[in-house]
Image (cartoon, rainbow, N blue to C red):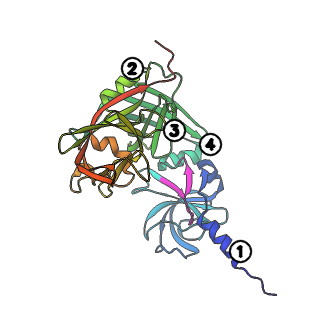
Amino acid sequence: MKKNLAPLFFFLLCGMMNAHPMAISFNEMIKQSKTICIAKFLDEYNYESLAYNIGVEEVLKGKQDTGKLSVTKAYGTPQLKKGERFIAFINESGALEWGGTADDPEKDLIQLQGYYDYNAYFVSPGGLTLVQLKQYLAENKFTGELNADLEFFDYEKQVFEKSQTSFHCTFTYDDSDKETYDLKSTGLTVVDFKGKPEFSYDGSGIQISYEENMVRPLQFDGIVDSIGSGGHYFHCQVSVSEPENLDMKMFYEYVAHPEYGPLWYELQVTLEDSTKYTIVEDIEMGRIGYIIYGKDSIECNAGGGPSRTDTSYYIFGGYDDPLIRISLDCLPQNDPRFKDYTGESDLYLIPALRMTNYTGRFYVREKNGLMFKGNCTISLKAIHFGKNENWKGK
């Protein structure tokens, strides 16, 4: 009797569509690589191909000769252009499972990834220089030295400005998948953040974390922007990622006052007739905020800033049948200050309001439904520090 394979095919198809990302540690990838070489991809990109030709220029690991080599497909298609130079990591089965790419593999930071057609395939750490790769293959470890300058964006001048704070870190990654580091800071005095901050390096970016809680966090993130000629020295520009929206003055105020917690905001709504209302945002964890309308504080059910491509809104007093609705226009299309403000618009609420006012329309529910009360602007009225609920001092 002929079997019906449709349910099985449907199950497998659903499994591929919902495939989870794959991940591997750098040291495990090296162990599973029979051959590692600097190579050139010789074929045109073809999703359906099951084998590829590469031109081996230099063998870093394995017994492979230089010259043309045919490799098979592992879990996915290499995202490479014909003639592109890269680092090829070929597994024990002769399949091209991982690759490292850079504009110039000998000089630039090499970004590592596994090839997987149904999702991402992460390597961790995800990048290093060719010098570090050769060091690891010879010594079962690679080392690095990193300087990071803390910068803040000046919204008035539209430039990043360097602060008095910088970090210096030496680090080692070894074949036990362990990263050790020695991190020092200059120009930073922390009153209440105790112990050694955590440092992580993913191959292209760094994170320095003194505290990750939601009451009084302190965390920095940065991206490698230059590499020294020796292949072990890196420079980063870092910014404060937690708490969000701190300028330089507010940052040093925050670290000097252990009683300070997360920021909260007052936005001002101004109608054409000069009537003003205040929106309070993020004053309490778990709430968006509220609008002060007369003697009432009306809860916000949804809201956020627009982007260059998307409008937005605020609604208060009920999601489906609100008491107040503010419909917001897009940010100015041709203003270069907003060139990156596309998508995820709520993340840019405060930065955008530091540079411009939002424009929109103000509606209030009356007997006949929502009634238009006039055009309006929303501006940033004030930024406040909340209370650190964990602070036990005076």
Left-right relation of 81 to 61: left
Marks 3 and 1 sit apart, C-alpha to C-alpha, by: 43 Å
Which circle, 3 or 1, is nearer the viewer?
Answer: 1
Amino acid carrying mark 3 in the image? Ser
Q: Give the range drawn in magenta.
A: 111-125
- Seen from the viewer's position, the closer of residues 243 and 290 is 290
Left-right relation of 9 to 55: right
- Where residue 353 sits in the image (x, y, percent)? 28, 42
**Of callouts 3 and 1, the N-terminal one:** 1
Question: Which residue corresponds to mark 1?
Answer: 8
Which residue is farthest front?
367
Amino acid carrying mark 1 in the image? Leu
- Seen from the viewer's position, the closer of residues 214 and 197 is 214
Question: Which residue corresponds to mark 3?
Answer: 200
- Seen from the viewer's position, the closer of residues 295 and 313 is 295
Judge whether 365 appears above or below 91 on screen: above
Amino acid carrying mark 2 in the image? Ala
- Where residue 299 sits in the image (x, y, percent)? 42, 40
- Where residue 238 sits in the image (x, y, percent)? 38, 37
**Of callouts 2 and 1, the N-terminal one:** 1
- Seen from the viewer's position, the closer of residues 363 and 234 is 363
Question: Which residue corresponds to mark 4?
Answer: 177
Q: Is disc 1 placed on a helix, strand or loop?
A: helix
**Of callouts 3 and 2, the N-terminal one:** 3
Marks 3 and 2 sit apart, C-alpha to C-alpha, by: 25 Å
**Of callouts 4 and 3, the N-terminal one:** 4
Q: Can residue 365 be seen from the camera position used here?
A: yes
Marks 4 and 3 sit apart, C-alpha to C-alpha, by: 13 Å
**Of callouts 2 and 4, the N-terminal one:** 4
Which residue is farthest top?
394
